[in-house]
Image (cartoon, helix red, strand yellow):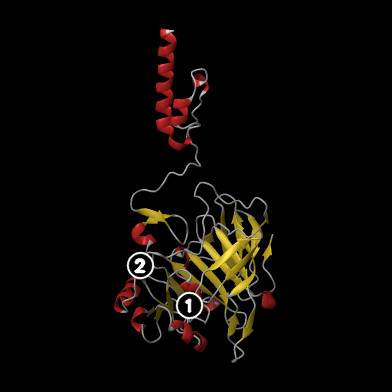
Amino acid sequence: MKNTTKLLSVLLLICSVFASACGNDAAQSQSDVGNTSAATIAEVTIPAATPTEPQGLPDGYMYSYLTGLPVAEEVGRLRPLGFQIDNERKAQPQCAISRADVVYEVPIEANEVRLTAIFQDISGLDRIGPLRSCRSYHPGILAEFGGILVHNGHSKYAVEKLNSCDDIELVNKDYEAQFRSSDHLTGHNNFTNQEKIEKRIEYRKFERNLSQDYTYKFLFADENQRNNLENGRPANKVTTGFTQNKSYFVYNEQDGLYYRYAWGKEHVDGDTGEQIAVKNIIIEYCSYHLEDDRSNKFINTVGTGAGAFVTNGKVVDITWEKEGYWNNTHYYYEDGTEIKLNPGKSWVCIVLPKMTGESVFE
């Protein structure tokens, strides 16, 4: 009897040590072990921690609102900066584009599309651009990120919206923030950089950090439990439908990224030579009509519509919803659940089916 008691005491001690080491992943909590009868103690199994166990973040780090990836808090709390990037053939190659966290590809006049490259961290960027003008819907895009819009001019229809947001306008009031680069053609050679932008933000007295009550538009899957769209259709190639640059993405199963092509070749960053690659692609189908000048488009980004979500080689149909111009756009699966992006960079295409048809997934 004495030996049995001693054996039970040793087993209890071993279970207690293992439970302490494994934390919440123990098959039974320490209180459960304490209540386990002597007849079953020898059967208690404590599994090892698995790779899907959340590991937490080091002190001073947070998950980025733009990518869902760990970043230093001083970076993660910065207001994003959105740059209107010239997307014409003559403007190639674009610089700093591979560093953007989120990029919007949106039609403007005729069959042209323009890029809005959104960054939370522009440190070390010596050339961002070439830069071009914004349209009436671009301030609303940056508002969803709590950001500051940087543009080189604007349409007359954008003036009212620009008066209600923080923006850096390089043609007149913020002319000092731009410079011209000799390796790009005239008219497509207006650039800016980190130093000039930060000086203008300080001069204009714009708040540099996000408000404490800021809520972000994207949800992200847990970093160790990726969203594989199990019920999705294959999407190894995504053709956007934009006729200006005939852009498309090709999935690389090795790293799980979509590599971008435009103008019949790899879409690369002009300064780094790096091909643009993203983790998530969102297709947002919108209707539109022409403004009274019969040239500028009024794109209906408010309301609801259809779309598609692409990640990890799969695509699913989604819907989007935006209550008002300054509100966030939310994206939902067909069952009404809000989608979760995989941590990483994202590319959002606002596609006008009336003009180009829907995007193609192969």
Query: How dense is the environment of label 1, judged by Cα within 10 Å: few (below 14), some, or many (20 and up)?
Result: many
Residue 108, placed above or below residue 194: below
Residue in view at x 44 percent, y 25 percent: 15
The quadrant in which residue 232 appears is bottom right
Task: Count every numbered label the image shows and give the total.
Answer: 2
One can see residue 193 in this view: yes
Q: Is residue 266 visible?
A: no
Q: Is residue 71 above or below residue 103?
A: above
The circle drawn on residue 23 is: none
Tell me whether the residue at label 1 lies in contact with that at label 2, contact meaning CB atoms closer than 8 angstroms: no
Res 209 label: 2
Q: Is residue 340 left or right of residue 199?
A: right
Where does the N terminus fall, quadrant-wise?
A: top left
Q: Could you tell me the amino acid type at mark 2?
A: Asn
| Picture residue at 42% right of the left edge, 21% below the top | 12
Q: Secondary structure at mark 2?
A: loop
| Disc on res. 139 | 1
Image quadrant occupied by the C terminus: bottom right
Q: Amino acid at mark 1?
A: Pro
Q: Position of residue 137 (x, y in %)?
A: 53, 79
Along the horizontal axis of the image, is 330 left or right of 17? right
